[in-house]
Image: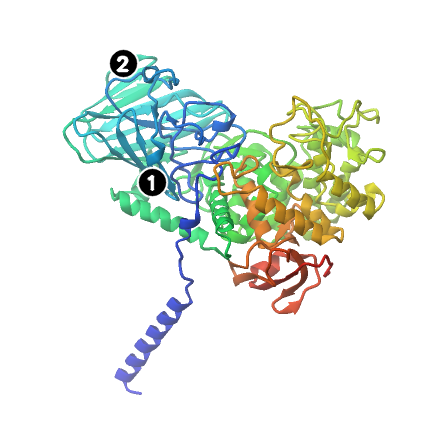
Amino acid sequence: MNKKSFLFAGALSLCLFSCENKQAEPEMEDLTQFVDPRIGTGGHGHVFFGANVPYGFVQLGPTSIPQSWDWVSGYHESDSTVIGFPHTHLSGTGIGDLHDINVMPVVGEVTYARGDTTSYETGLWSYSDRSKEMVTPGYYRTHLSRYNVDVELTATKRVGFHKYTFPEKESPAIVFDMVNGGCWDKTTDAVIRVVNDSTLSGYRYSKGWADDQRIFFRAEFSRKFDSVAFIVNDSVKEGKMAQGAQLFARVNFSAGNPAPIYMKVALSPTSEEGAQLNMQTELSGWDFEQTVADAKAAWNKELNKVKVSTQDAMSKKIFYTSLYHTLFAPSEFCDVNGDYYGADKQMHHEKGFKNYTTFSLWDTYRAAQPLMTILQPERMSDIINTMLHIYQQQGKLPVWHLMGCETNCMVGNPGVPVVADAILKDIKGFDSELAFKALKESSMLPERGMEYRIQYGFIPADKMTEAIAYDMEYAIADWAVAQAARRLGKQEDYTYFLERSKSYKNYFDASTGFMRGKLSDGSWRTPFSPYASAHRDDDYCEGNAWQYTWLVPQDVEGLVACFGSKDAFVHKLDSLFLASGDMGEASSPDISGLIGQYAHGNEPSHHITYLYTLVGQPWKTAERVKEILHTMYTDQPDGLSGNEDVGQMSAWYILSSFGFYQVEPAGGKFVFGYPNFDKVEIAVPGGQFVIKREDKGQKNCYIQGVLLNGKEYKKAWIDYADIMKGGELTFLMGDKQTVWY
């Protein structure tokens, strides 16, 4: 072959290789069209409503006047008031915080306060014209009726991008409100400084759910401003800088320019310089439309990891909205160079991993985190490394971590199953020995009731409130530690923690068939009603005996043995979905989404329907899962039966729609239930994992048989490893109640 021929052959080969690669790339479908961000903005869903990108630090959207329970995300569909557009929000929580670096476009004279609906004169607030309000993934738009201003918002991970169109004859102004955050949030210190004639910089420190929260910012404007007026403690202050807990700044622009004013606000957890670096790196230009397109592309990249085929348009909308909600958190909590604010209240310069925050672990260890191990395995090493650094900085794994602060919210040791799950699933990129050290030490700390478990073998109900809930969650975590110990060859630890994971048996009263409070002298707490609930003030946590009796996902065989037989267990489980009784006036509002006493609106119930499969009656799992999928989730604003809980409620829907759910707290044994779609294609490291449903029909809701890669499959579950290597799982459906395993 001559040289020319050789070169031609090489070029042809390269071309063919490129063409083959292009053909091999999966087509990127616009799946954002199936996302409806309004789902969960009504009822008690508490979801964020605004502009953000997957796992972004910035969540930019409106906040309303009320500071009560249904407004913890800042927005509720029942209320069209707006006090401003803060750059941080929570989604689906039961406690409120954040709403940092709040900005409000205004014209004319205003009162620098939150205000109330008696009059516009009471504050900065305006009504939002809901007929002009629109949200799509990565973009928000509304019209402020009071000021006649059109508002458009988009975002990168660390930068909020604003577009304000003011009335042509008015003098535009943008107010920075460092006072009014979210519920339970209070500013402790704030600074705003003028950098130049088109740039501000500063910070906001606050105390709330997160007890020492620090957010730094840099704001740049598309045109020069005329002046900046500082208002500190209701007094006007002149100069280039102002400081105080009661701080506002009004940025004034000249009238007569009809062009929109653009503003970019970059956030940092470390410094004003960090915010500047984040701005330069993520959004150096001023192309608003391109930023909207980039945000949409970021959402589509994540949404396209799962493709569902169905004729049920509503279920498809619910599915992709659910997937969208699971991608809000954990959120990146570091600068673009890796610098972050740690749990030890120190700045850390880390280049080896991305630091995260917003760990609602009591909720998310059950389904949201297992879902991440399937859809985001490459992100999990950063998640685990974050948790291990938190352990090193505060002496234990996170419980409910927010903005570098441990809130210790909720019961048990919910960070433990997440780390153990990563060990058991062989997630790469972290030190497994350090991870086990964190598991063990976090599980031995004599605090939050653990001291009583160590002393008595269980937590006596006369020693602390929510004793049953704490102990049963600790037992779940202990089982996870035991499994990790066995995987790592630590037999002594395995034996110890496995035995301790059975502490739940102390609460089972065979005479009633319920878990009930036991006192330190061994007697039962009286009086007793399995229906009774006193919110955060009884032996349970956001639940009652009917719900907590089943909170043993780690040892179903042991729980069955408590009842004496499988038949007795099933009879009691059947009763759960039929029982009706008085919960009392002080009952927890979180006990919602009821089918009998099964409460889908709160997390301790989320595994319960799958227990039927594990005791040989999978048709009952199918019936209940199908019922929940189609009655507890809708495409309306009140379409969630409880708090979104930072993705957990949605993750249950996603996994259950696949046809399986991880019942055990760690390890990746996904128990079969009811496949909701004709076909599901999941992008995994091994290529594609395809789930098919055959013999489709409304009445054919029972699994008759299972095929894995075309071969008969005789298990009641599928293992994580089999999902991740790719392949095809086929559910053969029919109307016969049968057992295939």
Whether residue 696 is visible: yes
Q: Residues within 10 Å of mark 1 (few under 14, many from 20)?
A: many
Front residue (pair 616, 620): 620
Percent x, y of residue 82: 37, 26
In the picture, which quadrant includes the C terminus?
bottom right
Identify the amino acid type marked 1.
Thr
Percent x, y of residue 652: 58, 45
Front residue (pair 395, 666): 666
**Label 1 vs 2, first from the N-terminus:** 1
Q: Which residue is mark 2?
A: 236
Report the side of 188 relative to 455 (left or right): left
Report the side of 586 relative to 20 (left or right): right
Whether residue 367 is visible: no
In the current view of this chain or complex, which residue is farthest to the left? 256
Q: Residue at x 52, y 44 (%)?
A: 383
> Whole-Å distance between the Cαs marked 1 and 2?
32 Å
**Mark 1: which secondary structure?**
strand
Residue 689, quarter of the rendered image: bottom right
Q: Residues within 10 Å of mark 2 (few under 14, many from 20)?
A: few
Select label 1 or label 2 by which is in front. 1
Q: Which circle marks residue 154 in the picture?
A: 1
Q: Which circle marks residue 564 in the picture?
A: none
Percent x, y of residue 549: 74, 37
**Mark 2: which secondary structure?**
strand
In the picture, which quadrant includes the N terminus?
bottom left
